[in-house]
Image (cartoon, rainbow, N blue to C red):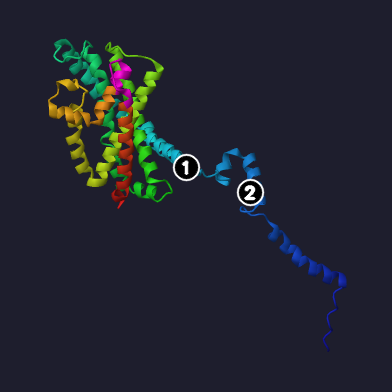
Amino acid sequence: MSAVPAAPLPASADQAAGESAPAAQTPAAQTPTAQSPAGQAALGQSSARRPDLGLLLVPPRARTGWRLVPARVLAMCAVELQKLRHDRTELYTRAVQPALWLLIFGETFTKLHAIPTGGIPYLDYLAPGIIAQSAMFIAIFYGIMIIWERDSGVLTKLLVTPTPRAALVTGKAFAAGVKAVIQAVVVVVIAAALGVAMTWNPLRLLGVVVVVLLGSAFFSCLSMTIAGIVLTRDRLMGIGQAITMPLFFGSNALYPVALMPGWLQVISKANPLSYQVDALRGLLIGTHAHLASDFAVLALATVLGITAASALLGRLAR
């Protein structure tokens, strides 16, 4: 038997088959992608319907220009303060030492009248110095946290981000300043309970906040600079303990500069803590103070500290 040839398809069937292939490809070619304007519009509409998924589907617009560095600084500061939110033990333990200075040292020397303070009760004279001291004690060991972040790998991850190193250091420095402001509030409350006559002028209190922020930022940058030099926690602890008390006793926190020997007066004039204490006394209890030079020295010291710590941050991460 001979094979029977297949019957040809009708012309309409050939045309339908020929038209079906492009029709099957057309939807795939015209499907909007996430990079296309149509895809972005579709994602925007879906995120509008689901506001909780908005940032996951459509990333926020990146900050550029002058807004970049302040945004990174605030972000780093917020990250550091989150640690304090989860563990407030540090606030309670650090409030013990300034309370002892005011209750024991301040009350005792107020009754002795051993240190001339120009007619001001010694406890009033001492309170601003204790505020500066407690802020310095918080900031001076801040470099230990940087070394811990280096050891855990966090610092290396931060350095590979587009964030400038100066923004990283500045954020950490002012986070230490915010902690110091909280500590200063505790000291002010204790001093007020002991009868210290302080001003409650809002502008002067705002000046106190700025002074504490600048002073703590400088000392935290000093600690981070030392950390970039010594590279280990043990060495930093030793150096921090070695310089903390000389900085404190070499300032006008406990006694006027006029009572110091000549060589100590020279050290006191080069000590940023002296300018911080002088500004705090002028703002809180109304003594004569050189506020313009105090703010200028603290601001300059903070800028120099940020510059030095930023330069050594890469060495710490190696």
Give the residue at x 24% y 20%.
99
What is the distance, in whole Å, between disc 1 and disc 2 at their CAs?
A: 25 Å
Horizontal side of residue 274 vs 76, given as left or right: left
Residue in the foreground of this view, choosing between 74 and 233: 74
Q: Which element carries disc 2, helix, strand or loop?
A: helix
The residue labelled by disc 1 is 68
Q: Is residue 134 above or below residue 156?
A: above
Q: Earlier in the sequence, mark 1 or mark 2?
A: 2
Horizontal side of residue 57 vs 226, given as left or right: right
Give the residue at x 33% y 42%.
307
The magenta segment? 279-292
Q: Can residue 179 be spotted in the picture? A: no
Q: Which element carries disc 1, helix, strand or loop?
A: helix
Type of amino acid under label 1: Leu
Residue 26 in the image, given as x and y percentages of width and height: 73, 61
Mark 1 or 2, closer to the camera: 1
Q: Quadrant of residue 197?
A: top left
Question: Is 59 colored magenta in this rendering?
Answer: no
Determine contact: label 1, label 2, CB under 8 Å. no
The residue labelled by disc 2 is 40
Question: Is 290 colored magenta in this rendering?
Answer: yes
Horizontal side of residue 213 vs 231, given as left or right: right
Q: Is residue 33 above or below residue 247?
A: below
Which of the image's four quarters has the N terminus?
Answer: bottom right
